[in-house]
Image (cartoon, rainbow, N blue to C red):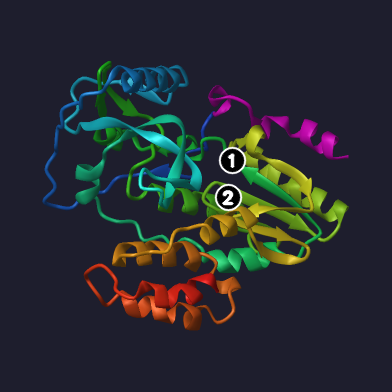
């Protein structure tokens, strides 16, 4: 039955970037409104080492081939590209001094565009993002779930024609403008959330939750959940929203939503995250205390009496220098 539904609506699912046709501009278009005193800024390209240059070249060719970008030579706005490590989580490793410290795990490189100058003069879109705890409460407690993901979600939203030159970027291979909405724009998250809500407005909170490009469909029986999925796939086809086959999970009894495990039992913490927090080194400075509380506070709602447990650490934040007597709060960290 599930396979039949997926086959009947296979055009709603994509396998490569070329499968993206773009959400209809009648549904959603990204616009960039500038402050009245805004003046165009042309920034020069940045130097890239051979490895980073190759990353940029591959990304530019991929986006150009998919019709997401196009060459442009006379834009008044130009932003530079740079390359950053792809982050795939956090782990704890031993440094040269034998101390255990948290570090990001990298899995390759990705091209980014520095839109800071443009963002600083862009009028901000204050469309609200949903409260994460409320999403989790509505998603948890159901027998079956589908976890869906929009294929390169931002690239499915068209940028208005008059604004495309504003998001021109420079790289060693020329200057290019985006037809579709790129990452890095200050109002992109708001535009995307507004678009998703407009597409699924009659389904949200009934049998679907959406946070940016993460879509969760749920039901209390196999047939109910399957029917709900079919409604979602039909809507995706109508609005030309394409889902990512590799990142979708169909008809499962539990899964990870917003870094929490949800199932018919309710909401649970992700054990890998707890292991990471438990293995963090004892903080010795105000900065390290803030970092520790940031990690632990992510699961605030699931830790009974969290504020009381964390109070001794919060009190230490009032100091500017290295902390004295940190050993006295070890027992609170163990909690």
- In the image, taking residue 32 as reference, residue 74 lies left or right, namely left
**Tag 2–tag 1 contact (CB < 8 Å):** yes
Judge by depth and name the residue closer to the eye, 252 or 165. 252
33 vs 240: above or below: below
Residue 16 belongs to the span the image colors magenta: yes
Distance between mark 2 and mark 1 Cα atoms: 7 Å
Residue 51 belongs to the span the image colors magenta: no
Q: Position of residue 288 (x, y in %)?
A: 35, 62
Which tag, 2 or 1, sits closer to the chain's start? 2
Which residue: 50% across, 49% down? Answer: 195
- In the image, taking residue 216 as reference, residue 296 lies left or right, namely left
**Residue 206 - label:** none
Please provide the residue range marked out in magenta: 1-20
Q: Position of residue 233 (x, y in %)?
A: 70, 42
Secondary structure under tag 1 reads: helix
Say which residue label 2 marks. 199
Crowding at dot 2, Cα within 10 Å, few <14 / some 14-19 / many 20+, comes out as many
**Residue 27 can be seen in this image:** no
**Residue 47 can be seen in this image:** yes
Judge by depth and name the residue closer to the eye, 208 or 138. 138
Crowding at dot 1, Cα within 10 Å, few <14 / some 14-19 / many 20+, comes out as some
- Position of the N terminus, as image quadrant, is top right
Say which residue label 1 marks. 239
- In the image, taking residue 25 as reference, residue 164 lies left or right, namely left
The picture quadrant where one finds residue 65 is top left
- In the image, taking residue 200 as reference, residue 92 lies left or right, namely left
148 vs 297: above or below: above
Tell me which secondary structure the magenta stretch mostly adopts: helix
- Position of the C terminus, as image quadrant, is bottom right
């Amino acid at each position: 039955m599930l396979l039949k539904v997926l086959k009947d609506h296979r055009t709603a699912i994509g396998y490569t970037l070329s499968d993206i046709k773009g959400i209809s501009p009648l549904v959603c278009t990204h616009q960039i409104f500038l402050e009245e005193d805004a003046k165009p800024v042309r920034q020069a390209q940045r130097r890239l080492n051979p490895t980073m240059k190759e990353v940029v070249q591959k990304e530019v060719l991929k986006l150009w081939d998919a019709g997401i970008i196009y060459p442009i030579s006379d834009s008044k706005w130009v932003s530079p590209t740079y390359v950053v490590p792809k982050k795939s989580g956090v782990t704890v490793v031993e440094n040269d001094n034998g101390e255990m410290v948290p570090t990001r795990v990298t899995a390759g490189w990705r091209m980014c565009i520095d839109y800071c100058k443009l963002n600083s003069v862009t009028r901000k879109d204050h469309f609200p993002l949903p409260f994460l705890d409320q999403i989790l409460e509505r998603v948890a407690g159901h027998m079956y779930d589908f976890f869906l993901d929009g294929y390169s979600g931002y690239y499915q939203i068209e940028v208005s024609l008059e604004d495309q030159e504003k998001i021109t970027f420079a790289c060693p291979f020329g200057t290019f403008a985006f037809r579709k909405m790129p990452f890095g724009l200050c109002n992109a998250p708001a535009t995307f959330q507004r678009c998703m809500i407009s597409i699924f407005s009659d389904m949200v909170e009934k049998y679907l939750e959406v946070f940016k490009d993460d879509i969760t469909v749920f039901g209390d029986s196999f047939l109910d959940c399957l029917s709900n999925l079919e409604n979602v796939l039909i809507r995706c086809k109508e609005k030309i929203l394409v889902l990512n086959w590799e990142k979708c999970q169909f008809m499962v009894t539990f899964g990870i939503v917003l870094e929490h495990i949800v199932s018919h039992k309710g909401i649970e913490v992700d054990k890998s995250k707890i292991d990471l927090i438990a293995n963090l080194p004892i903080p010795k400075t105000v900065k390290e205390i803030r970092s520790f509380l940031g990690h632990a506070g992510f699961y605030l709602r699931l830790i009974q009496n969290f504020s009381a447990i964390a109070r001794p650490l919060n009190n230490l934040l009032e100091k500017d220098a290295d902390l004295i007597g940190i050993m006295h709060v070890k027992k609170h960290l163990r909690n």
